[in-house]
Amino acid sequence: MQSMLMIMLVVVLNLIPKEVSMFTMEMNKGDVMRYAKQEDGGWSLVQPQSKSNPTFHVAGTKLTVKADDRAQTLDLAKILGVGENADWHKLKQTQTGTLPLQIEGKTNGVDFILQAKKGAESVSQVINVRWQGKETK
């Protein structure tokens, strides 16, 4: 799994209200991934469908990916630059490799902004995550 996606999932799943059962992640215009909450509290990608259909569980900075009767847990505390008792609403930026990933909280989701330089030009990509239901601050 790509490290940027893992970072975004940890942030999103720490911000999303408990009452919400589905969210979308739009990587590019029209390229939408839909995640649904499972009975065990994990989250699975439901659109587009994948062969392994992993389930993602988050506890603070730890992301557990369960697929094919196996589970792998990764602690992203160092990458995110936060501790165990982080206030996820105050996290405004983290790193994805050498590039900064800005984090902007919205009332119904979060935007991730990845900025890079191509020559003298600055290029940015915005990844929109949205959920319906209870709003966050």
Image (cartoon, helix red, strand yellow):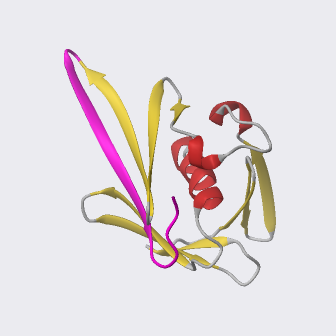
Give coordinates of residue 1: x percent, y percent.
58, 50
Residue furthest to the top in view is: 120
**Is 125 displayed left or right of 37 in the figure?**
left
Reply yes or no: does residue 125 show up in magenta. Answer: yes
What residue range appears in magenta? 119-137
Taking 64 as reference, is 52 above or below it? below
Could you tell me which residue is drawn at 71 percent across and 31 percent down?
A: 78
The question of residue 98 being in magenta is answered with: no
Q: Residue at x 25, y 31 (%)?
A: 123
Numbered label tally: 0
**Residue 23: % across, % down:** 48, 71
Q: Position of residue 41 (x, y in %)?
A: 73, 75
Q: Quadrant of residue 36?
A: bottom right
Image: 87 above or below 64: above
User: As drawn, which residue projects farthest toward the bottom?
Assistant: 39
Residue positioned 78% across, 54% down in the render: 72
Q: Is residue 7 above or below residue 54?
A: above
Q: Position of residue 134 (x, y in %)?
A: 52, 75
